[in-house]
Amino acid sequence: MLDLIKSRKSVRKYTDKHISDEDLKKILEAGRLAPSWMNSQPWKFILVKSQENKDLLSELSLGQAQVKNADALIVCIADEEEWEKKGISNIQNPALNPALQGENGLIIRTSEQLVYAISYMMLEAESLGISSCIVGATGNEITGISPELYKKVKAELNLNEKQILSTIITLGYDAENADKPKQRNDFNYVVSLEKIGNEF
Ligand SMILES: Cc1cc2nc3c(=O)[nH]c(=O)nc-3n(C[C@H](O)[C@H](O)[C@H](O)COP(=O)(O)O)c2cc1C
C-alpha cells in the first residue's frame, strides 16, 4: 500500500484508452465501502461518461481541462439527507449529531465523510493502473463559484437541495508520463512523539 501511495500522483492529461465498466465498478465499490461517522454514509457517486456532462462540469470547475478530457468522472455528492435517514439527526447529543455542532457543523461533517470515500476510490483506481485528479475548485454551496451555472448543473444531475456537489474525481490512463517528485513536508516536520516538536 505504501508503494502505491508513494507512486500515486495527480494526472491531468489522459490517453484515448477507455476504462472498462468492470474497473469503474471496482473504483465505485471502494467508495461505497468507505468508513463514515456512525456509518452515516452521507454520499452519492455519479459516474459521468458523456462529453456533454463533462463539458458542463468543466465549465463549472473554472474550465479545468482535465474535467472535460478525462475518460470518466466520478461526481461525489455530499448528501445531508443521509443523517436523517440513519436517525442521527434525531440524537440530542451534539457530540454525536453534526447538525448540533454549530452553524456549519452539518456541511463540515458531511464533507469530512466524503474524504474517506474519495481517498478509497483514488487508491483503488491507482491499483488498477488508472490515474486521477481530485477537483475541488468547482461551483457549489461552499465555494459560491458560478451560482447560476451550479443551479443548472444541480438540475441536470437531479440533485435536491440537501445534495451538494462536493468534489469531482477525473479518471483516465496517464498521458503525461511525468516523473513528478513528491513535494511534501518532511517526516519530522509533520510527525511528533507525544507532543509537537518531540521527534519520533
Ligand atoms: C480536496 C482537493 C482538491 C483539489 N482540487 C484540485 C483542483 O481543483 N484542480 C487540480 O488541478 N488539482 C486539485 N487537487 C490536486 C492537488 O493539487 C494535488 O493533490 C496536490 O498538488 C499534490 O500533488 P499530487 O496529487 O500529484 O501528489 C486537489 C486535491 C485535493 C485533495
Image (tube, rainbow, N blue to C red):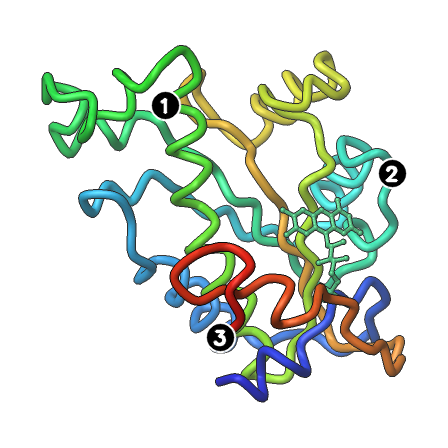
Q: Residue 67 carries which label?
A: none
For marks 1 and 2 on the same chain, the one whose residue lies earlier in the sequence? 2
Residue 35, above or below 124? above
**Picture coordinates of residue 35 (x, y %)?**
29, 56
Give the residue furthest to the front: 198
Q: How crowded is mark 3: few (under 14 residues within 10 Å), some or many (20 or more)?
A: few
Q: What element carries label 2?
A: loop
Q: In the rendered image, which residue does mark 2 sit on?
A: 63
Question: Is residue 168 found left or right of 175 in the rendered image?
Answer: left
| Local crowd size for mark 2, using a 10 Å CA cut-off: few (<14), some (14–19), many (≥20) | some
Q: What's the CA distance linking mark 1 and mark 3?
A: 35 Å
What secondary structure is found at the residue carrying circle 3? loop
The amino acid sitting under disc 3 is Phe
Q: Is residue 80 left or right of residue 149?
A: left
Residue 200, label in figure? 3
Foreground label between 3 and 2: 3
Most extreme residue toward the bottom is 3
Residue 106's disc is 1
Q: Nearer the viewer, residue 181 or 149?
A: 181
- The amino acid type, in three-letter code, at marker 1 is Leu
**Numbered disc 1: secondary structure:** helix
Tell me where residue 86 appears, x and y as whole percent.
15, 34
| Residue depicted at 38% across the width and 22% down the height | 105
Query: Few, some or many C-alpha atoms within 10 Å of disc 1 (few <14, some 14-19, many ≥20)?
Result: some
Q: Nearer the viewer, mark 1 or mark 2?
A: 1
